[in-house]
Image (spheres, grey):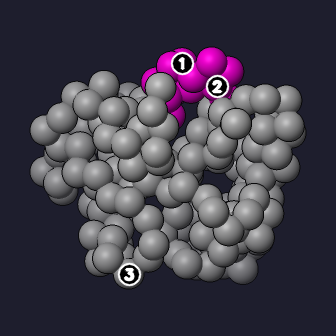
Amino acid sequence: MPKIIIITGPPASGKSTITKRLAELADKGAVINVDDLRDMIKAGQVKPWEQKNEAKEQILLGTKNACTLAKNLLEAGFDVFIDDVIISGELINEYKKHLGKELKIIVLLPTETTITKRDGVRGPDDKMGKRATELHKKFFEAKDKINWQVIDNSKITIDETVQKIKVLTNETR
């Protein structure tokens, strides 16, 4: 039966790499990168971290669009792997409202040192700098307060991370 798994974590935690790998290994797999959906807005786009009501509205719009796309892919028989930065219970509830209460959410949370190293080798358009460490701190503070599975992937390979996710999501193939 097709499934939806959300992979979250701070920038440079490996979300994009891991969702892509999971999708490649599925019989039918698709990745939804929510940042790509949010970047569809070309005029009037507000960065998600800006303290503006419009930022919150655009975050919710990106989530709603990701959920609509995920449902369409699921109906077509695809396993769906969503890559998004989700820190708040409010945003998790938004996903659950649209996709169901039994969502599987995995947090990739390598050490701050690992985040800094990985962010440092990104291209200039992808570097998050201080924002990456700020978000790492927020995820670290939230890791035991929200019902999700946390993986420290600082010292394990992509394939080992994927295997841990498969175990945590009860996928045996």
Magenta span: 19-30
- Contact between marks 1 and 2 (CB within 8 A): the answer is yes
Which of the numbered marks, if any, corresponds to residue 24?
1
Residue type of the residue flagged with mark 3: Lys
Of residues 37 and 109, the one nearer the viewer is 109
Earlier in the chain: of badge 2 and badge 3, it is: 2
Image quadrant in which you'd find residue 36: top right
**Please, is residue 146 above or below residue 100 in the view?**
below
**Whole-percent x and y of residue 173?**
47, 26
Q: Secondary structure at mark 3?
A: loop
Query: Going from the N terminus, do you reach mark 3 or mark 1 first?
Result: 1
Residue shown at the point (33%, 58%) measured from the top left: 150
The disc at residue 29 is 2
Q: In screen coordinates, is 151 left or right of 23? A: left
29 in magenta: yes
Distance (Cα) linking label 2 and label 3: 30 Å
Number of the label disc, if any, that sits on residue 103: none
**Rendered image: mark on residue 145:** 3
Instruction: Quarter of the image for the N terminus: give it.
Output: top right
Task: Label 1, secondary structure: give it.
Answer: helix
Instruction: Classify 28 as above or below 126.
Output: above
Q: Nearer the viewer, residue 11 or 28?
A: 28
- The reply to whether dot 2 and dot 3 touch (C-beta < 8 Å) is no
Compared across the picture, whether 95 is left or right of 136 comes to right
